Image (cartoon, grey):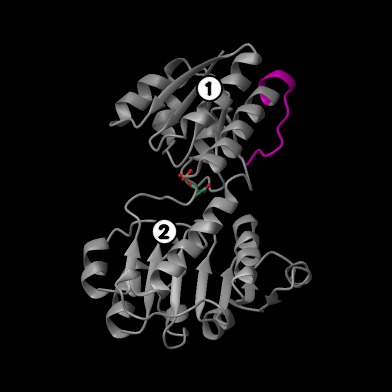
């Protein structure tokens, strides 16, 4: 049985060692396709793979069709908007994610971005502290919970809104649960985005919510660019010279954002949230273990399709 790790953005070598151990101890073989430069390479590599470990790599109907032996795809990470679940289901392929395994890494990056921006991108001038500011966490999942924990360490006031998580479980963490996204955006100095990209959430962060944000507000996005209405954000950037946007997902209109938001806008060139050895080890090894358990014992925990 061939398990293929196909990652445009490679795991740390130490994570690959761990994945290899899990796969080979189970009697399977491991193949690697890292940092590939074309979809053709991916289509070729999946041709004889029974199992696939990916990150944000696009697994569409064409990739599924090119992999006739494929039984399982594990997205080593949280968001699986990059996988065509319908095509996988039709081909009888199980799709899983590894929730929670990289969430601390993403949450830590939120604060890396925030301190950087609050200190005026280290340009030598006097900036601000996070202590005493109010942070609003939009969606209280695995990353959101870690953001809350770290924010308390900074001495921030912490609030959250989640359409699905009960207010009582948010409040149990000492976090103020707000009843709507509108209230979150209106009452927080910083909003940290953690909603998944779904048909319902795509472009959901636009004019209505942005205009609610108070003077000097900061929006930090370590989730997905698809949830942002990028045209509305660009307009808002132009209209509100006090507003800052920090993101770990390069917007499609990055050049225009840089122009409009000089000194108030920053994007990592490539998504870095989950790019730590620890997150790679946790998510990569969990993915390998889930594959072994599925192929050997039929365990479908973490199935998303
Ligand atoms: C996730 O959904 O797990 C994060 O966005 C990390 O994505 P990555 O594995 O592509 O870095």
* x 64%, y 59%: residue: 141
Residue 73 on the magenta span: no
SS state under label 1: loop
* x 74%, y 21%: residue: 297
Of marks 2 and 1, which one's residue comes earlier in the chain?
A: 1
Q: Which residue is mark 2?
A: 226
Q: Position of residue 36 (x, y in %)?
A: 33, 30
Q: Are marks 2 and 1 in contact (CB under 8 Å)?
A: no
Disc 1 Cβ-to-ligand 1 distance below 8 Å: no
* x 35%, y 32%: residue: 35
Number of numbered discs visible in the structure rendering = 2
Residue 264 vs 228, above or below: the answer is below
Residue 94 vs 164, above or below: the answer is above
Q: Position of residue 137 (x, y in %)?
A: 58, 70
Front-most of residues 69 and 99: 99
Residue 104 vs 289, above or below: the answer is below
Residue 161 visible in the picture: no
Give the magenta-colored segment's residue range.
Answer: 294-305
Residue 281 visible in the picture: yes
Q: Is residue 238 left or right of residue 200?
A: left
Front-most of residues 239 and 283: 283
Q: Residues within 10 Å of mark 1 (few under 14, many from 20)?
A: many
Q: Is residue 253 left or right of residue 29?
A: left
Q: Quadrant of the N terminus?
A: top right
Q: Quadrant of the C terminus?
A: top right
Residue 297 on the magenta span: yes
**Gap in angstroms between the C-alphas marked 2 and 1:** 28 Å
Q: Position of residue 220 (x, y in %)?
A: 45, 67
- The answer to which quarter of the image holds residue 65 is top left
Q: Which residue is mark 1?
A: 70
- The answer to which quarter of the image holds residue 73 is top right
């Amino acid at each position: 049985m061939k398990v293929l790790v196909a990652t445009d953005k490679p795991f740390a070598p130490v994570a690959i060692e761990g994945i290899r151990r899990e796969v080979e101890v189970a009697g399977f073989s491991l193949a690697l396709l890292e940092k590939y430069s074309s979809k053709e390479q991916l289509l070729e590599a999946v041709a004889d793979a029974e199992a696939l470990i990916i990150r944000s790599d696009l697994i569409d109907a064409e990739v599924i069709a090119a992999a006739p032996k494929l039984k399982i795809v594990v997205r080593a990470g949280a968001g699986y908007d990059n996988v065509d679940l319908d095509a996988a289901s039709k081909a009888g392929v199980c799709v899983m994610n590894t929730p929670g395994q990289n969430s601390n890494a993403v949450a830590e990056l939120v604060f890396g971005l925030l301190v950087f921006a609050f200190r005026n991108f280290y340009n030598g001038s006097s900036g601000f502290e996070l202590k005493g500011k109010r942070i609003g966490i939009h969606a209280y999942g695995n990353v959101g919970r870690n953001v809350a924990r770290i924010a308390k360490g900074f001495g921030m006031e912490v609030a959250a809104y989640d359409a699905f998580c009960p207010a009582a479980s948010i409040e149990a963490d000492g976090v103020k649960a707000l009843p709507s996204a509108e209230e979150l955006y209106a009452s927080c100095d910083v909003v940290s985005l953690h909603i998944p990209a779904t048909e319902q959430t795509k472009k959901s962060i636009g004019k209505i919510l942005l205009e609610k944000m108070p003077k000097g507000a900061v929006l930090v996005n370590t989730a997905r660019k698809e949830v942002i209405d990028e045209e509305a954000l660009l307009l808002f950037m132009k209209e509100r010279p006090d507003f800052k946007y920090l993101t770990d997902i390069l917007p499609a209109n990055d050049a225009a954002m840089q122009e409009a938001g000089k000194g108030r806008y920053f994007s990592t060139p490539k998504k870095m949230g989950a790019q730590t050895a620890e997150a790679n080890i946790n998510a990569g090894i969990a993915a390998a273990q889930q594959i072994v358990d599925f192929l050997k014992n039929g365990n479908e925990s973490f199935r998303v399709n």
